[in-house]
Image: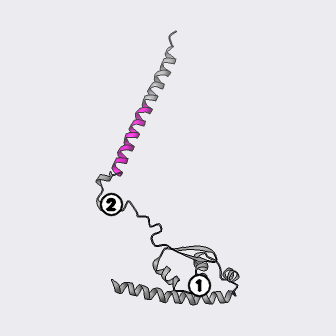
Amino acid sequence: MKPNNHEQSKQHAFDSFCKKILKHEARDYYDELKRQNSREITFSDLSVKEMEQLHTVDKYFVTEQIFTALGLDVIVTDDVIAGALESLSERKRDIILLSYFLELSDREIGDKLNMLRSTVQYQRTSTLRQLKKFMEVDIYEQQEKK
């Protein structure tokens, strides 16, 4: 059985439509490849400076110091801050660690250390002044060494 002219013209129109779609999809694909190639660069074409920007060095456990406050471990990664904290008495160190590293309020710290809130606040502010002086001296000494 032979298809009539109307069915045959529908088949030709559909065939033409499919070929157009495939042609345009192929063109879009090649245009996208061209766009991608214009934006990307191979590793071998990068300069040494550009290659160095592509990586980082992990510093796990390099300069970490662990302090304990009320049975909780607090990790300090900065040597200057760790040295300053080591110079404090245990009670003052606990107040600073609980306040700034564990983010407890003065009232919560007072409850845990059996102290008044005002005493915790006074100890915290006076200890901060002490830490500031210690760190300023430490930074000054480091600059003199250079």
> Badge 1 local density, few (<14 within 10 Å), some, or many (20+)?
few
- Residue 145: percent from left, percent from top: 34, 85
Q: CA distance from mark 2 to mark 1?
A: 47 Å
Asked if residue 13 is positioned above or below residue 102 in the image, the reply reads above
Most foreground residue, 90 or 48:
90
Say which amino acid is labelled 1: Glu
Say which amino acid is labelled 2: Glu
- Residue 85: percent from left, percent from top: 52, 82
Asked if residue 76 is positioned above or below residue 87 in the image, the reply reads above
Q: Main secondary structure of the magenta part?
A: helix
Q: Which mark is residue 44?
A: none
User: First in sequence: mark 2 or mark 1?
Assistant: 2
Q: Secondary structure at mark 1?
A: helix
Q: Which mark is residue 50?
A: 2
Residue shown at 43% from the left, 86% from the top? 138
State how many labels appear: 2
Residue 23 part of the magenta segment: yes
Q: Secondary structure at mark 2?
A: helix
- Residue 46: percent from left, percent from top: 30, 56
Image position of 100 (left or right of 14): right
Circles 2 and 1: CB atoms closer than 8 Å: no
Residue that numbered label 1 is attached to: 90
Residue shown at 61% from the left, 80% from the top? 99
> Badge 2 local density, few (<14 within 10 Å), some, or many (20+)?
few
- Residue 88: percent from left, percent from top: 54, 86
Bounds of the magenta span? 20-40
Residue 78 part of the magenta segment: no
Residue shown at 52% from the left, 83% from the top? 86
* Quadrant housing the C terminus: bottom left
Q: Which quarter of the figure has residue 49?
A: bottom left
